[in-house]
Image: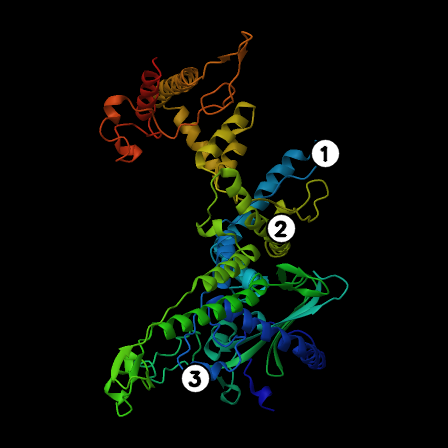
Amino acid sequence: MADQKIDLSGSKLLIEGTPKTREEWAKRIGDRRESLKGDQTDRQTIYRRRYDFYIGDQASYTTIVGKVAKEKKGHANAVYNYAGKTTVKIGYGLSNNPPKVTVPARTMPEDFIETERSRTQAVEDFSEDVFKRNHFWKGAYRRACFNQVSMADAFIKVYPVNKGTADNPEWDIKIVSHEKMGNLLVGWRGDDPMEFDFVIAEEKRTVQSIFDEFGVKVPLELHEVKQDTEKQTSSHQNNGQWGVSGTAQRISLPSGKTNEPSVTLVEYDDENVYALMIGKQLIQLAFKDDKSFPKMKFWVHVPNIPQPGSPWSISDIDFLIDPQVEFNEASNDERDYIRVGAQQRYVAYNMNEFDPESLKASSGGVIFVDSPDGTAKFDPLQTNVNTFPVDSYLNRVRDVIYDLGAPKVTYGVSGADSGRSKAIDYQSMVDLLVFKRDSWELALDYVMEKIQVLGDFYFKFDFFKDPATEKFVVRHPEFDWSDILPVTQGDKVVNVLNKVTMGLPFEYAFKELGYRDVDAVLNAMRREAKDEDLMMFRSKMYQLAGGLVEAQKRAQEQIQGVNQTPGVTSAAGSAEMVTPGFGGPGAPAVNQPGPVLNQTQNQGRESSLPMAQRGGTTSFTSPRGFIERTRQNMQAAGG
């Protein structure tokens, strides 16, 4: 058989078991792969549809009867890709704000608590180093986020790699994201939608990459050539009816396909076995018996929106497909309506011998009529196009798309007029991201667990063990995500300072402020504390800062006093309070976006210039700007 010609003499891979055992496992993997082909075929259909709506290639999805014939008559195919843009926005919200991962110390007896804290910190540092070496947060994590949102599921693989030799191994932990979900076959357990028995991944690999990574030589008989699919033909070519040259077909996005010789590499993974196959021949078979590999699965599932009755999730784009099609078809009808109405037509009275070809093709058609009075004339046809009902319908459909996906405020087009209403507009986006973050927390917990298992198995560090029993123990992390609603950095600083005044240690304060290397910050503070000149300057700045705060407080009190509206005396002689307002009794504290300008600053240019150029000082980033602003407010209030 051709499969037996694969040269494994220089292979770097481990093949365990007897020839009979290898043959049995090869048959078992082939049978399991074949049993999941039906599920794979069903999923590839919806994956193709999701991808088309993600990139905006939606021309073939239509509800128009006789679409092809209509296109040949100049049908304008308008595609406004709100569905794809919505999923991109959600993907940005996830991928641009990864969580900060910390490993808290477990509850321990007093004799072991300090050792547990130091070991916990070591586990956190080790895991963070693994993430950095794999460029996880800006690589696999980001791409998995977009797979989760657009394709409904994402899978991450955590596995060991021997960069050395069998005699002198150099182990490393790799973390990768699986890209093509259609090439993945998962043997779901059936009793739990989150659990699976095995994973089979099929991937086209070039022969050169297999030789470079595994040392396996694939014979020429097994080479497959990746054939680029023929370019899709489209009937979107204009037949010249409107007097314009035909428009080109839609340009497809780069596919990355090549004609390099390649083979299908089949990867099999379960809790007991890890294997690689080319054709029907195993090129690797490793038993996870805690000798060469730890007894664990390498794959982690990141679900999206639950689909009751199925372990596969629902994509965010699925709910937007139908309204997106309806929106585009309505847009096409509107464009046809405008196009037809905008073409200038003519009426020929008693001019049967007139040749319409003598007119420019772009001027439209000629209508021949007989005039009752027998006169011959040639007039343009008056047309009237009213698109307002169509526009209203399109706006309603677009609002439906917004309501199902990301709200308008996410695109910066909200008409909200207050902070509370904007927060309400953001609520649907908050719900989306919080739900997906919970899924990621569960997946990242599994990833951290696998990192610790592999780290203990291959590196034998003491900090992976329990200080009381000196046995391996898994430490589960905690995740700190950034705020979804817009929060200024100044608000974060104020919140942390309030906690510090309550006794929060600097270590936790700097963590909340976003510093990843807290120890480096604390060491820098210790070095500065030994500098006498710098400490003297800092003491003066502390005094100045306190004075600024007090001055600002007094200025606001005086301004509120000036703006107080006096009470109205009733006929009975009692003072009645006026309706509370901006300047009336009971009004809230004045929230000033800028300083109060005096008359000379306002004169002649009260509203012609922006606030920053009307003579006022709006800087809050320097003590001088803060002092000038406070002094000006006090002078305006009569202080």
**Vertical side of 97 occupied by 345: above or below:** below
Q: Amino acid at mark 1?
A: Pro
Q: Residue 473: x, y in percent?
A: 69, 48
Q: Residue 48: x, y in percent?
A: 54, 73
Q: How is the image coloured?
A: rainbow
**Vertical side of 314 occupied by 525: above or below:** above
Q: Which mark is residue 463?
A: none
Residue nearest the viewer, comparing 575 with 194: 575
Q: Is residue 413 visible?
A: yes
**First in residue order: circle 2 vs circle 1:** 1
How many neighbours does mark 2 have within 10 angstroms: few (below 14), some (14-19), or many (20 or more)?
some
Which residue appears at 45% of the width and 65% of the height?
A: 80
Eye-nearest disc, 2 or 1: 2
Q: Residue 192: x, y in percent?
A: 74, 61
For label 1, the residue is: 109
Quadrant of image for the N terminus: bottom right
- Regarding mark 2 in the picture, which secondary structure is present there? helix
CA distance for labels 2 and 3 = 44 Å
Residue nearest the viewer, comparing 337 with 541: 337
- Regarding mark 3 in the picture, which secondary structure is present there? loop
CA distance for labels 1 and 3 = 73 Å
How many neighbours does mark 3 have within 10 angstroms: few (below 14), some (14-19), or many (20 or more)?
few
Residue nearest the viewer, comparing 40 with 281: 40
For label 2, the residue is: 438
**Vertical side of 171 occupied by 472: above or below:** above
For label 3, the residue is: 233
Q: Is residue 460 visible?
A: no
How many neighbours does mark 1 have within 10 angstroms: few (below 14), some (14-19), or many (20 or more)?
few
CA distance for labels 2 and 1 = 31 Å
